[in-house]
């Protein structure tokens, strides 16, 4: 690679890392771990009785917290940070390379190979979704800030999907955009979890790629993710995270304007969710009954995502909180290693290829295990980064990006 590219390594290595961004990334990784541990690290729909079983009061609280406070929110934060990092990295590369877009595309391609391997092991892998959208993001890098904000908001609110779902309800009396059979899919995936050996599991994950794509399209998760990419890039352009004072001002303004609306949406979500379950509505016979909850869920997701981001930014500007949240930055700096390790542990804990604890533990016990795993990851990350510049996977990724072994051990 060229000499300018070698010089860029020092910058991208972390000399200009933004602490609040790393803390946000670590915070998101906890939410992602929680979201998967609560369902035994299942990467697809399970038979209905697993969701409706009575596991006790603590499990009820853990599960309700998942649906209301975790589900879909932390991948949104992760997606926002991906868009922000895209801008920051491309901006940094432009100072040291004559071909910043080509180098970033190469970096994405390597991440795609990592994602493909990860998807083969565990089909809920998000990297295999991020990489194609990341290439698409390259084509949006030159549009105006107003266009970024407008398109990003439309996608984050999931309006294209909601409009098409409404049209489907009117025309065909169902809201799914692509046909799927959840009962067949959940039965097939249950076999992957509880019966398949390692090779059969990998084969099942590859065959489940279509089901994964159907879910991404039917739920709108695909365009929501890209919408957060765009909003992250928009915030990066405005330089909010480059200046703690500006970030705090913007976060405080947004927080003051939105917290009452957010609490109202949460209250509606609780009341609606309880009422929906008490009424035991059969959504196959009455698909219209679910549509308002889909709309409400989308708005709760975006509201809570903004609440989490603004809250972390505001807390990071207070010395007491910054000191206590700082350990999350170690996880954030090793995000790829942490993310891959979480799924490795989750699969071997719960799947047949490992200890086979699927269904043997309760959701509450799973969250207890989740906290232990994350605490150990945090301790390991802090220990590792005192001795090395990068996480293990991050180091391999960077070395492959620059086609040269990067310095790893701190002297």
Image (tube, rainbow, N blue to C red):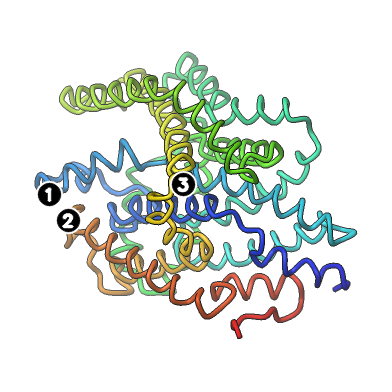
Q: Residue at x 57, y 47 (%)?
A: 81
> Horizontally, is 103 left or right of 235 in the view?
right
Residue positioned most to the front: 319
Which secondary structure lies at badge 1?
loop
In the rendered image, which residue does mark 1 sit on? Answer: 55
Which quadrant does the N terminus fall into? bottom right
Bin the neighbour count of mark 1 within 10 Å (Cα to Cα): few under 14, some 14-19, many 20 and up: some
Which quadrant does the C terminus fall into? bottom right
Which secondary structure lies at badge 2?
loop
Q: Label 2 near label 1: C-beta < 8 Å?
A: yes
Q: Position of residue 64 (x, y in %)?
A: 23, 39
Looking at the image, tell me whether mark 1 or mark 2 is earlier in sequence order. Answer: 1
Taking depth in this image into account, of 90 and 361 the one nearest to the observer is 90
Taking depth in this image into account, of 234 and 106 the one nearest to the observer is 234
Q: Which mark is residue 316?
A: 3
Residue positioned most to the bottom: 411
> Horizontally, is 380 left or right of 350 in the view?
right
In the rendered image, which residue does mark 2 sit on? Answer: 362
């Amino acid at each position: 690679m060229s000499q300018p590219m070698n010089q860029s390594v020092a910058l991208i290595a972390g000399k200009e890392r933004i602490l609040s961004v790393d803390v946000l990334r670590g915070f998101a990784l906890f939410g992602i771990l929680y979201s998967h541990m609560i369902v035994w690290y299942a990467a697809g729909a399970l038979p209905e009785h697993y969701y409706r079983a009575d596991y006790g009061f603590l499990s009820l609280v853990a599960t309700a917290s998942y649906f209301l406070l975790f589900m879909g929110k932390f991948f949104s934060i992760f997606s926002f940070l991906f868009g922000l990092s895209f801008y920051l990295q491309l901006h940094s590369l432009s100072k040291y390379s004559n071909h910043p877009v080509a180098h970033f595309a190469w970096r994405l391609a390597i991440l795609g190979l990592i994602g493909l391997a990860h998807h083969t092991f565990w089909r809920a892998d998000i990297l295999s979704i991020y990489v194609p959208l990341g290439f698409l993001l390259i084509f949006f890098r030159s549009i105006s800030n107003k266009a970024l904000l407008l398109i990003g908001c439309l996608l984050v609110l999931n309006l294209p999907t909601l409009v098409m779902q409404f049209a489907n309800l009117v025309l065909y009396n169902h809201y799914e955009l692509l046909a799927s059979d959840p009962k067949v899919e959940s039965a097939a995936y249950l076999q992957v979890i509880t019966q398949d050996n390692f090779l059969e599991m990998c084969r099942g994950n590859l065959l489940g790629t279509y089901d994964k794509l159907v879910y991404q399209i039917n739920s709108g998760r695909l365009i929501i993710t890209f919408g957060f990419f765009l909003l992250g890039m928009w915030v990066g352009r405005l330089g909010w995270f480059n200046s703690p004072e500006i970030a705090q001002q913007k976060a405080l303004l947004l927080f003051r304007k939105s917290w009452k609306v957010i609490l109202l949406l949460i209250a509606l979500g609780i009341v609606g969710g309880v009422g929906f379950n008490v009424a035991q509505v059969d959504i196959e016979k009455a698909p219209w009954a679910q549509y308002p909850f889909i709309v409400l869920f989308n708005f709760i997701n975006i509201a809570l995502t903004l609440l989490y981001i603004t809250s972390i930014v505001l807390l990071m500007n207070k010395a007491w909180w910054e000191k206590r949240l700082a350990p999350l930055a170690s996880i954030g700096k090793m995000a790829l290693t942490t993310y891959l390790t979480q799924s490795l542990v989750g699969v071997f804990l719960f799947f047949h290829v490992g200890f086979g604890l699927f269904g043997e533990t309760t959701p509450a016990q799973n969250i207890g295990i989740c906290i232990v795993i994350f605490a150990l990851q945090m301790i390991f990350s802090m220990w590792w980064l005192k001795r090395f510049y990068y996480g293990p996977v991050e180091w391999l990724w960077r070395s492959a990006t620059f086609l040269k072994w990067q310095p790893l051990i701190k002297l």
